[in-house]
Amino acid sequence: MMFETERCSLSLFKESDSAAVSNLFTNPEVRKYLGGIRDADSLKETLEDMLDPQPGSYYWVVRKKSTKDFIGLISLDSHHEGIDQEVSYQLLPDWWGRGYAAETVAMIIDFALNILKLPAVVAETQSENIPSCRLLEKLGMELERKVFRYGAEQRLYAIRTI
């Protein structure tokens, strides 16, 4: 399953993407609000899970269409509370603030709601991650509640169709 936006291609994660995706999980800037960098064992397990996802879980590698440069990773996966599907995203810092996250996350939200016909899509981010909060609001997600999790205040955003 592949998608294209104006500037990006999104393709399902495959083994040949492992090195690029590993760079995301070990980048301190990327992981600042995501629990810190991942150790080798945890990262290996995550990559294996991404290669053989649970039904209804998707992991897309985002690349710039014109150059095939690796931009980041977007997933649609069960939120850890187990009720809704969650859209998550990690982009390398070189691509921040240039609209790539908005362009690609909007595509996945549209896929979730209009193709998969999910009743909702959620996203959780640290309250301190102001750019991510703004992005989710820009994409039409509404703040549902704040929770204290992973040692910090988190904001749970959602788009619900019912």
Image (tube, rainbow, N blue to C red):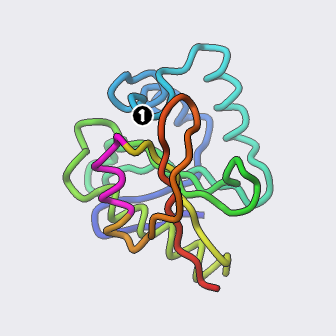
Q: Residue at x 30, y 58 (%)?
A: 134
Quadrant that contains the N terminus:
bottom right
Left or right of 12 in this view: 26: left
Q: Residue at x 53, y 67 (%)?
A: 158
Identity of the residue furthest to the top in this view: 40
Quadrant that contains the C terminus:
bottom right
Residue nearest the observer in this picture, 17 or 88: 88
Residue nearest the observer in this picture, 86 or 115: 86
Left or right of 81 in this view: 14: left
Is 57 included in the stretch rendered in magenta?
Answer: no
Residue kind at label 1, given as amino acid type: Tyr
Residue nearest the observer in this picture, 30 or 128: 128
Say few, some or many: other residues with alpha carbon within 10 Å of mark 1 (under 14 / 14 to 19 / 20 or more).
some
Q: Which residue is mark 1?
A: 33
Q: Position of residue 138 (x, y in %)?
A: 31, 68
Q: Position of residue 128 (x, y in %)?
A: 35, 40
Residue nearest the observer in this picture, 44 or 32: 32
The quadrant holding residue 66 is bottom left
Q: From what the image shows, is residue 160 above or below residue 26?
A: below
Left or right of 122 in this view: 5: left
Identity of the residue furthest to the left in this view: 98
Q: Main secondary structure of the magenta part?
A: helix
Q: Residue at x 65, y 21 (%)?
A: 42
Q: Residue at x 55, y 31 (%)?
A: 18
Q: Kindly state the secondary structure of the residue where label 1 is placed.
A: loop
Q: Position of residue 143 (x, y in %)?
A: 46, 64
Q: Which residues are magenta?
A: 128-136
